[in-house]
Amino acid sequence: MFRRREPVPFAFVAEADRFRSNVTPPPRQRASVGQMAGRWLLGLTIVAGLVGSLVLGMPALSVNSSTPAQQSQASQGH
């Protein structure tokens, strides 16, 4: 039931398991309207940047199949 612990070189480490604080941290403050709006604006800007980079980058990544593939002169036997 009770397990013996190995000796610890520092006494404060051994006592840390038994220590429990009776001090509760203060409650977190709620974000103001301005802070919430700033967070939404930052998130919207990041998403818009990612979408914009996709919109601008997709034409460069697409393969145009309507034009014939170019061949070098070496492949034609010249």
Image: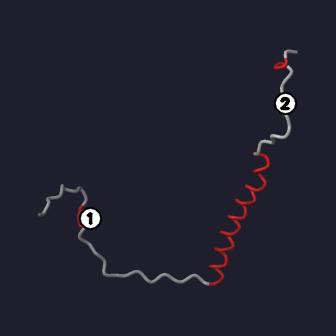
Question: Is residue 39 positioned above or below 51 on the image?
Answer: below
Question: Is residue 16 positioned above or below 29 on the image?
Answer: above
Which residue does the image show at 72% across and 61% down from the upper left?
Answer: 49
Residue situated in front as seen by the camera: 19 or 31: 31
Which residue does the image show at 26% across and 64% down from the upper left?
Answer: 12
Q: Which residue is mark 1?
A: 12
Q: Counting residues from the N terminus, which is met first, the one under dot 2 or under dot 1?
A: 1
Question: Is residue 41 positioned above or below 70 on the image?
Answer: below
| Total labels drawn | 2
Q: Of helix, strand and loop, which one carries label 1?
A: helix
Q: Quarter of the image containing the N terminus?
A: bottom left
Residue situated in front as seen by the camera: 39 or 59: 59
Q: Nearer the viewer, mark 2 or mark 1?
A: 2
For label 2, count other residues whose C-alpha is less than 10 Å away and answer few (under 14), some (14-19) or many (20+).
few
Which residue does the image show at 76% across and 45% down from the upper left?
Answer: 62
Q: Position of residue 24 (x, y in %)?
A: 37, 82
Q: Is residue 63 left or right of residue 27?
A: right
Residue situated in front as seen by the camera: 6 or 54: 54
**Hey, which quadrant is residue 34 in on the image?**
bottom right
Q: Which residue is mark 2?
A: 70
Q: Amino acid at mark 2?
A: Gln
Q: Quarter of the image containing the C terminus?
A: top right
- Cα distance in 3D space between marks 2 and 1: 75 Å
